[in-house]
Amino acid sequence: MNHQSSAKWSFWQTILLLIGIVMLIGVSTFLAMMLMQHYPNPDELWAMATNMFTLFGLLLGVGVAFALLAAAVSFLALNQKLYEAQSYLAQARLHLDDYKQLSHQENLIQDKIHQLIKYHQSLLLTPVNTNSMEVEPILSLSKQITTSEFANFEARLLARSIEQDIYAKQAVHLAQNQPSIHTWRDAMQQFEQASYLWQAMLSASSDNLLNYIRNNYLSAKLYQATATQHLAMLNGTAQQNAHYRQLDALYAPVLALNGASKDAQTNHLISQAAYQNAMLAYQEGEILWQENQNIESVSHKWYEAKQSFQAAFQLQRDDAEIPYQYGSLLEREARLIAQTDAQRLPEARQLWLQAREQYRLALDIQPKKPEALLNWGNTFADEATAIVQTNADTLPEARILWQNAREKFQQTLEIQPNFDAAAYNAGMTLNKEADIILHLNQNVDEVCQLWQQAGERFQAALSINPSRYDVVNSWGLVLAKEADLRFKMGHDNLPQAQKLWQSAQQRFHHALELEPELQAAATNWRTVLTNESNAVNQTNRKVLWQTASDKIASLRQMSPNHAASESIKELADVIQQQLLKFESMNQLQPVGQLRSMTKPE
């Protein structure tokens, strides 16, 4: 405003000066002409001219004075302008310094944001330890940004979102290591807050950060869903359905993208959501089966799971876990269909075939995945048992399937030699094959040979994991069955049968040492005692039961759990009753004394 006023005043000064000069020239010319007309005499004209020049000099002096005054005023105005210009320049320099300082601080904030994002991106789907070295720089940078006066709203919101994301992942890490309702609920709440912050960032962020923010939002939703699933399992059936219903809403924003993104990280998150959704439907199907045993409702729920597994694998074809779990679902459905409806056996067989194809896909991605080979073998074993129980004429085909199963179990052990389940399952296929052959054609030698091979597999499983009481019990069972069969084939086989019975009892005794509440082992031991007792003479029979009684007594002294075991107590009572029978049989019954008759008085 001051600059405009000064310019206006300078303009009018110039105009006035020009007007003054023009008027002076005009008046002088007019006076000269008037004098020449009124004073034709040169002397008079000269005298008048002299007077006029004197007047003109006076006027000129006045004009010069006026000009000097105008110049002085102009000089003062110019000085004022110069002073104002210097003031403006000083202010401009101050503003420029402030701008440079602000620009420098903003650049520092941007550098910190880029560094923060770089650190954080490596932890997208990774729970972090509280003491992790990766956490400290992230939290430090977040605090610097949120407390800086030079950070704008978007920068502070981003830093706060990352900070909350780290806190939430620490909560998940704690819950995984110390699982409880409290830790998983805290993890769920932490990620719920993180997802709100990331959602706010979606509407406030620039386009170049859109994928990064969206992926973290989806990741927070997935973690929240994981925590919700754990809460459902820990809270029991009363609250399971409520938690499971929440999962649909958590997976919805992830699955809504429908694989349209070309960003690999986003597609990975969508795939994970589809996979988790499939696993949820898988679990819900199992719950339905436990509740109503209705295969139709279970299959309907599992159809949803299959669709999700397929969608997940379409987006993430390098994840072996997806086809592996898909194969497990198909295998489980095939087994349930075969168990519930023999007429649907062809459908079950088709499902087993599809399951094997999924296991093959998993092994193509991850060749050293022993659980996939193990389950592949299980599909052969289950199919063999199902077809031969439905139609005895399929025994040759069933035996080929059992052999295929054992080959897969052997391949499993080649990949992972300490996988005891593979050796155990191989033993169970031999046991099942022996039972079926015995039932169909009574080939005793072949049956006994298969049981012996089963025992070798059980022994191999126990050499890997000596604490597996179920394997010990199964080993005792095949020994007991061989003993019964050999004695049944002829009493001349009694010594061999007794040796097998004794070995079986040792296994059942050892199984109860490992697990005192194993009712199957106690029942099997009692059966073996009874069968052997019926096969030997009276003297050996008593020794047999007494020996068993001594073993039970020592077993009950092993620990408080063994002493309190109902299974062991029931077996001890049965043995004691048998010993009491022997005692009562060996005691001589006293003869009643006759009282003498007396004559009445």
Image (cartoon, rainbow, N blue to C red):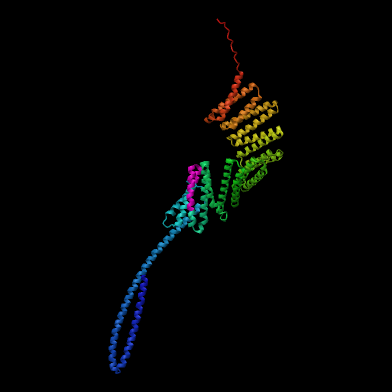
Q: Residue furthest top?
A: 601
Q: Against 90, is 190 above or below? A: above
Q: Which residues are magenta?
A: 171-198
- List x then y, in percent, for residue 322: 59, 48
Q: Is residue 72 visible?
A: yes
* On screen, residue 542 above or below 138: above
Q: Quadrant of residue 445?
A: top right
Asked whether 567 falls inside the magenta stretch, the response is no
Judged by its main secondary structure, the magenta piece is helix
Rendered image quadrant of residue 503: top right
Q: Is residue 265 left or right of residue 493?
A: left
Give the camera-side residue of 45 and 247.
247
Residue at x-position 68% and y-position 29%: 486
Residue 172's spot in the image, x, y percent?
A: 50, 46
Spot the residue most to the front. Answer: 601
Residue 294 at x, y percent in the picture: 60, 42
Identify which residue, 268 or 332, lies in the foreground.
Answer: 332
Q: From the top left corner, tell me how far across and down residue 291 is, in percent.
A: 57, 41
The N terminus, quarter of image: bottom left
Q: Nearer the viewer, residue 287 or 453?
A: 287
Q: How many marks?
A: 0
177 is higher (above) or lower (below) than 213? above
Task: Evaluate whether residue 129 shows in this view.
Answer: no
Q: Quadrant of the C terminus?
A: top right
Residue 187 sits inside the magenta stretch: yes
In the rendered image of this protein, does residue 371 appear above or below residue 535?
below
Q: Residue at x 63, y 32 (%)?
A: 477
